[in-house]
Image (cartoon, rainbow, N blue to C red):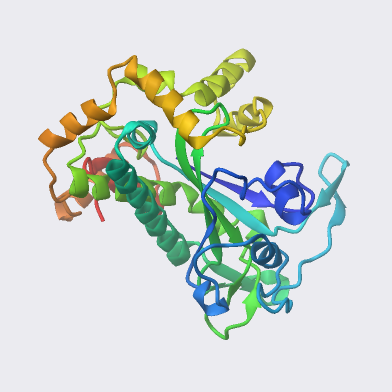
Amino acid sequence: MVGVTKIGRGNANYWIEAVAEGGDDYYMKPGEAPGQWMGELAAELGLSGKADRGEYTALLAGKHPKTGKVLVKRPKPRTFVDADGKKRKLEPILGYDIRFSMPKSLSLLWAIGSPEIQTTILSAHEHAVGEALVYLERHACYVQRGHGGKTIEPGEGFLSMNFLHRSSRAGDPALHSHLVTANMTRALSDGRWLSLANPKRQSPLLREAKASGYVYQTALRAFLTREIGAEWQPIVNGYADLAWVERRLIDHFSRRRNEIVEEMAERGTSSAAAAEVAAYRTRDAKDYGVDPDTQRADWRAGAAEFDFTEESIELLLSSARAREPHPIDAAQSEAALTDLESTHSHFDRRDLLCAIANRMSDGTD
């Protein structure tokens, strides 16, 4: 649903090597949409529309993307000894890769549907990513200053690049965005450029990631409830697939997820951290040489085996009832609060937001 990865020069991950070291570029591969600038501070630096390699490489290095002026000086890597007496290398954080993934059923609707429904699905995704980014700018954009970095202050906003990818590593339909966000903002109090706060290596961005994923999913449902009258399966952890799409079809086009689940089963693990490890262990190189038209034809042939075709989608849409999502009201908030009180010994604003989102079956704004 959502994931956040720190970007740093020393990481072995492919996206780090691509952006920080100038190697093979994962984000701007042929066949994928060009990155688009987002964030409160992008326009201020003259950034809009398509992002290019030079601009985002400069930002991750802490430089002005147009002039090359250093805005935030990145610290040099340093070595330290951990609690077990082992030497570790601490790398500076250049940015964050925030990934928002659409439910598989919606990716299938986009892959198999008409050009009109494809446009609607993409618009819904862009809207939902924008809502999630606004949430993060409100609740996760801070700077540190003062002796020992003990003073935490609000920042003015993010500098982000939205890279839309259409498929999983296994080649299945999987619309998702990599929101590459530079580790820098301007302090709201005096306009000074600083790195994003990371007190005791616990970034507010990481703490708010889960809640932003709930915002993304509920905004996505609201958009499509309003535009095409989408009907939804029960919400699980903020996430709901379309009621129109059978589970067996979703499973057929979920090879990447199945690889990760099988890897975890073999190792007897089940945590979110274990899932990340399994994803890394089972990761194959993504094939960008596939012609998009050929790929879509393959998807449609596979979906047709389940009677899921452009024609069947049009029939579903013709009988759907577009409607306004129910707004959040006092009753919904009280019910969510009661849910939390019955299952949690303590909770905070983020938990309440997620509990409310779990009750909004048609999504909400």
Specify the quadrant of the image occupied by residue 183. bottom right
Left or right of 300 on screen, residue 37: right
Residue name at image x 65 percent, y 30 percent:
277
Q: Nearer the viewer, residue 207 or 326?
A: 326
| x and y percentages locating residue 6 in the rendered image | 65, 51
Q: Quadrant of the C terminus?
A: bottom left
For residue 358, above or below residue 93: above
Q: Quadrant of the N terminus?
A: top left
Residue name at image x 40 percent, y 19 percent:
302
Left or right of 7 on screen, residue 313: left
Q: Nearer the viewer, residue 210 or 163?
A: 163
Left or right of 64 on screen, residue 238: left
Specify the quadrant of the image occupied by residue 86. top right
Specify the quadrant of the image occupied by residue 244. top left
Task: Please say whether residue 363 is visible from this viewpoint.
Answer: no
Residue name at image x 40 percent, y 40 percent:
102
Task: Please say whether residue 287 is visible from this viewpoint.
Answer: yes
For residue 338, above or below residue 54: above
Left or right of 290 on screen, residue 245: left
Q: Nearer the viewer, residue 16 or 343?
A: 16
